[in-house]
Amino acid sequence: MAALGVLEHASVMRALVRPGKNTFAEALRVRKMGLEFAHPVGLAGGFDKNAMRPRALAALGFAHVEIGTVTALAQEENPRPNLFRLPADHALVNRLGFPNEGADAVTKRLAEKGCDVPVGISIGKSRAVPTLPIDDAIADYVTSFRFARRALEKIKGFVVVNVSSPNTKDLRAMQAADIAKRLLDAISAENARDPRIPVLVKVAPDLDDAALDSLLDVVLASGIEGIVATNTTVAREHLVTDASTVASIGGGGLSGPPLRRRARTIVARARKKLGPERTIIGVGGISDGPSALAMLDAGADLLQLYTGMIYEGPFIARSLAREIAAARGC
Ligand SMILES: Cc1cc2nc3c(=O)[nH]c(=O)nc-3n(C[C@H](O)[C@H](O)[C@H](O)COP(=O)(O)O)c2cc1C
């Protein structure tokens, strides 16, 4: 984040680094949710939590950037240590717990800065607001949504309703169909007037098929645009790191290649159920050409990554876009 400061604040530097108008083949362009993306690869939620570096991240080559997760109330990170590397697996475990300056401040900053690429604003539940009674939790999301909407009247983008982080107590219970329906209905009611902002819901990889199907039914019935699949997992499968090291890290969400297969399975199932029109952003373990292409083949319209940038470096979006283009012969 510190290194990106120079890019963020000096437009001359961004102009030097930024991909030119014709860097990406026309055939890579994605038009979804009324937005246009130069190529499918974007930055996942959680890296730029406070909208400090959206312009720099766009200049690096991400064709969209998701900021946040923001919450209605500003809050600190969970006690440290809360972020771990599993180098042998190119994976991370985090239990940060949505540290952010609050939805009002962050979305104001974003709107003032602007951004060359579409921006996703991820909204979550404030830690201080319990999940039950559910009306309070919903009101907390709606507060954040209002702020996000205000920013997205000025800049192009979409909102992601994050109900799938494992690091806020009971948050994932909000994926249950009856609760998700009330939450998404409340957000849609707030989104009834023009301009209508595209809304997606971000799902956990740990949902079983029945729970996923019920949630997808809610997505279909609610009229929101689609899903982001997936968040980090609480499972500790497909790891080569030894079990005692993994156990010593403790709780949190695992990200990176060990998540790939599950994220892809969820995307494929969701595409079948949602049909071709809805938007699916595939995320989980994308770190090279084959993993990006496999996620697109599973049915994703757009891709996101976080852990892949930590291990492969800041220009990963560009190289993935090139690899997708090469594979498609464009
Ligand atoms: C350190 C860290 C913080 C994260 N914070 C958030 C967050 O605030 N909101 C969110 O929706 N996802 C968050 N995520 C999850 C990522 O957006 C993504 O869904 C997940 O890491 C899987 O993608 P990856 O394997 O490319 O990292 C975070 C991930 C990491 C590694």
Image (spheres, rainbow, N blue to C red):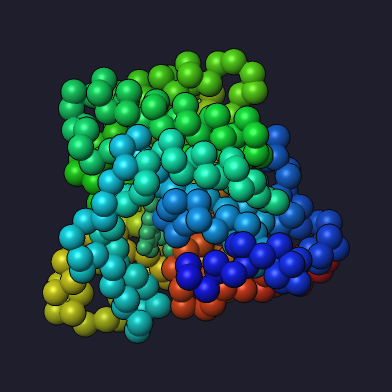
Q: Which residue is drawn at 36% across and 78% down?
A: 89
Tell me which residue sits at (70%, 35%) in the image.
34
Is residue 285 visible in the rendered image? The answer is no
Q: Residue at x 35, y 84 (%)?
A: 88
- Quadrant assignment, res 59: bottom right
Q: Where is residue 110 in the image (x, y as percent from the top left)?
A: 55, 45
Decide: is 119 above or below 330.
above
- Left or right: residue 4 compared with residue 329: left
Residue 273 drawn at (x, y percent): 51, 36
**Near-viewer residue (59 or 173):** 59
Q: Position of residue 23 (x, y in %)?
A: 81, 66
The vertical placement of 44 against 330, above or below, is: above
- The percent coordinates of residue 226 (x first, y second) are 53, 36
User: With respect to residue 281, does 132 lie above or below?
Assistant: above
- Left or right: 235 with respect to 297? left
Quarter-wise, where is residue 318 in the image?
bottom right
